[in-house]
Image (cartoon, rainbow, N blue to C red):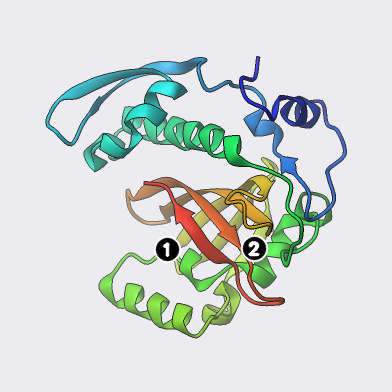
Amino acid sequence: MIRHGLAALLLAAACGASAAPAGDLWLSPALAVQAIDDALPSRFEVRLKDGSSASLATCADVVRLDATITEESSGANVNAKAFQSARVRCQALDAVKTLQRARHSLLPASPEKRGFAAALKTAAPASLYLAISDDSEREVAEAQARALTLKQFRPDTTFRQTAAGAVRIEVDDTLQDVQLLARGDFNADGTEDWLLRIDSRVVQGSYGNSGLWLMTRLRANGPLQVLRRWP
């Protein structure tokens, strides 16, 4: 049972209901299968910033302690990767509690119906580039200052829809799977936002990361702008 005011929308998404129009509410069925106080797939032991440890059994535990969990708890081993994935899901379940109908939108309309890959190709910002060196971080910062899209910043970037419903972005030996989890107004300013899950990795190497991003668009035909990134 879903335990917040968006229950009807989540259940409709899970049943394959038609998507709402742009500027309205839309939720991915991926958010419909777990309530915030349901048990996690497994119990996770994490380290906290005060030097103590905690055992996380539900998404409610993750949300309550999220800001105090150390980065080392999301490292490279298999259990840590499983925790990182669960953490993003829990953060998304918490984020949608503030979701309301948007009054207007400058985002591509109904990307879940009309093609999310095409929408990202035109709107994904340069900040989505997976910078893995100081030089590339500086280049990304310069591209952001110029309000470039990712495709303008790296013309060889490819965007491909996957069977799992995500969009795979590939450039410079990096892969990012971007999934649209929800769209609507998250911060009560009336403008439509997108809640995105982004799973990143390098082709050659062990680096991998999962994160939750909240994005919007403040001018027509401009790149998306990042409103928030969760740790």
Q: Looking at this view, is 196 or 132 the one in front?
A: 196
Say left or right for 215 vs 230: right
Which quadrant of the view contains residue 203?
bottom left
Disc on the earlier residue, 1 or 2: 1
Assign the N terminus to one quadrant of the image.
top right
Say left or right for 142 vs 6: left
x and y, in percent, of residue 209 in the image: 39, 47
Q: Who's the residue at 71% across and 76% down the image? A: 220
- Looking at the rendered structure, the secondary structure element under dot 1 is loop
Q: Amino acid at mark 1?
A: Leu
x and y, in percent, of residue 179 in the image: 61, 47
Please tell me whether residue 63 is drawn above or below residue 225 in the rendered image.
above
Q: Quick check: marks 1 and 2 in contact, CB under 8 Å? A: no
x and y, in percent, of residue 197 in the image: 54, 46
Please tell me whether residue 78 is drawn above or below residue 209 in the rendered image.
above
Q: Looking at this view, is 174 or 61 the one in front?
A: 61
Q: Which mark is residue 130?
A: 1
Neighbourhood count class around disc 1 (C-alpha, 10 Å): few under 14, some 14–19, many 20 upward: many
Q: Looking at this view, is 158 or 231 the one in front?
A: 231
Q: Who's the residue at 23% across and 38% down the image? A: 70
- Looking at the rendered structure, the secondary structure element under dot 2 is strand
Q: Amino acid at mark 2?
A: Phe
Q: Who's the residue at 26% across and 73% down the image? A: 134
x and y, in percent, of residue 160 in the image: 67, 58
Return the residue at label 2: 159
Please tell me whether residue 10 is drawn above or below residue 152 in the rendered image.
above
Mark-to-mark CA distance, 1 and 2:
14 Å
Say left or right for 114 vs 193: right
